[in-house]
Image (spheres, rainbow, N blue to C red):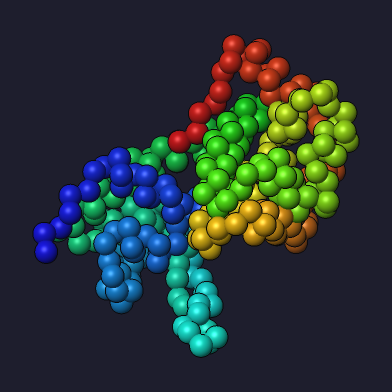
């Protein structure tokens, strides 16, 4: 069968669709999800490509575990039985190495090589620049990410059957903020009527909400949630898990983080609408 020609914009969307973000705001991909996008049907064949990529990583004197993290998942195999399935959490650089060592006869591999090469470089620049940003600049950056994240989350929630979006988002806030709704958070912060609570968060609090947003979107898609009740429960559970992760790491609970004196809206006006773009 002749291989279907894949457009670069379609491939880019596929890579972005399977991207995950951890509690530190770092991107990663699951190998088994990447395998499907790259046109591999058997794990054994794809794992050989991963092994070559890991060797290339080692030959570059880069720690393999920093880019290829082993994970184990329990998957259903029918009749209520489950088994352990091997997988990897891959960095953007790991995905690039896999693309470099993939089957060059596949058109999607060539596109992946270009995509991950360019995006890896952009990500390196972004991370270096982020460290040098002031707190206000970090807030502008993170707020831009949460805007984009909430847009994508709303699209996924709509497909999952959500109609009451205020209620849906409140479930997420209640999980993350120990039962507080958006109105509760606004009152605690002493905000004016209709002032967006996300505009009055510091970079750390915004990062926690970004993790809640992105992981809820992925869970809705991954588990094929198809009704409003389950979507709301999913948002609450993800928010609660993010809260538990912060607690385990010894971090400050989001409701205990300080509210900045200036809102993001004020910062944007001062910077003539400047938004620090993300890659």
Report which quarter residue 101 is drawn in.
bottom left
* Residue 117: x %, y % from top left: 32, 45
* Residue 146: x %, y % from top left: 60, 37
Q: Is residue 190 above or below residue 230?
A: above
- Left or right relative to 145: residue 207: right
12 and 69: which is toward the camera = 12
- Left or right relative to 257: residue 279: left
- Left or right relative to 32: residue 207: right
Q: Quadrant of the N terminus?
A: bottom left
Q: Residue at x 81, y 24 (%)?
A: 193
In this view of the protein, can residue 184 be seen by the observer?
yes
149 and 194: which is toward the camera = 194
Q: Is residue 237 above or below residue 139?
A: below
Report which quarter residue 63 is drawn in.
bottom left
* Residue farthest along the left direction in this orientation: 2
In this view of the protein, can residue 145 be seen by the observer?
no
Q: Residue at x 82, y 33 (%)?
A: 186
Q: Quadrant of the C terminus?
A: top left
* Residue 99: x %, y % from top left: 28, 56
Report which quarter residue 140 is drawn in.
top right
Q: Is residue 83 above or below residue 229?
A: below
Q: Residue at x 54, y 26 (%)?
A: 276
Q: Residue at x 40, y 62 (%)?
A: 33
């Amino acid at each position: 069968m002749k291989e279907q020609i894949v457009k670069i914009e379609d491939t880019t969307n596929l890579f972005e669709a399977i991207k995950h973000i951890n509690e530190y705001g770092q991107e990663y991909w699951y190998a088994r999800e990447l395998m499907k996008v790259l046109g591999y049907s058997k794990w054994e064949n794809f794992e050989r490509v991963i092994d070559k990529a890991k060797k290339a990583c080692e030959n570059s004197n880069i720690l393999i575990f920093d880019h290829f993290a082993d994970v184990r998942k329990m998957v259903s195999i029918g009749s209520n039985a489950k088994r352990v399935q091997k997988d990897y959490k891959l960095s953007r650089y790991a995905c690039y190495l896999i693309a470099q060592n993939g089957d060059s006869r596949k058109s999607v591999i060539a596109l992946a090589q270009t995509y991950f090469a360019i995006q890896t470089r952009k990500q390196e620049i972004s991370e270096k620049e982020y460290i040098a940003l002031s707190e206000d600049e970090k807030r502008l950056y993170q707020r831009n990410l949460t805007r984009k994240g909430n847009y994508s989350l709303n699209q996924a929630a709509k497909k999952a059957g959500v109609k009451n979006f205020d209620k849906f988002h409140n479930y997420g806030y209640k999980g993350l903020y120990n039962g507080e709704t958006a109105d509760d958070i606004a009152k605690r912060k002493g905000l004016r009527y209709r002032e967006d609570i996300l505009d009055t968060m510091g970079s750390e609090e915004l990062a926690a909400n970004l993790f809640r947003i992105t992981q809820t979107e992925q869970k809705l898609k991954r588990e094929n949630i198809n009704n409003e009740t389950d979507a709301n429960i999913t948002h609450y559970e993800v928010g609660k898990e993010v809260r538990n992760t912060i607690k385990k790491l010894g971090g400050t609970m989001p409701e205990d983080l300080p509210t900045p004196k200036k809102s993001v809206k004020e910062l944007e006006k001062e910077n003539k609408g400047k938004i620090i773009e993300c890659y």
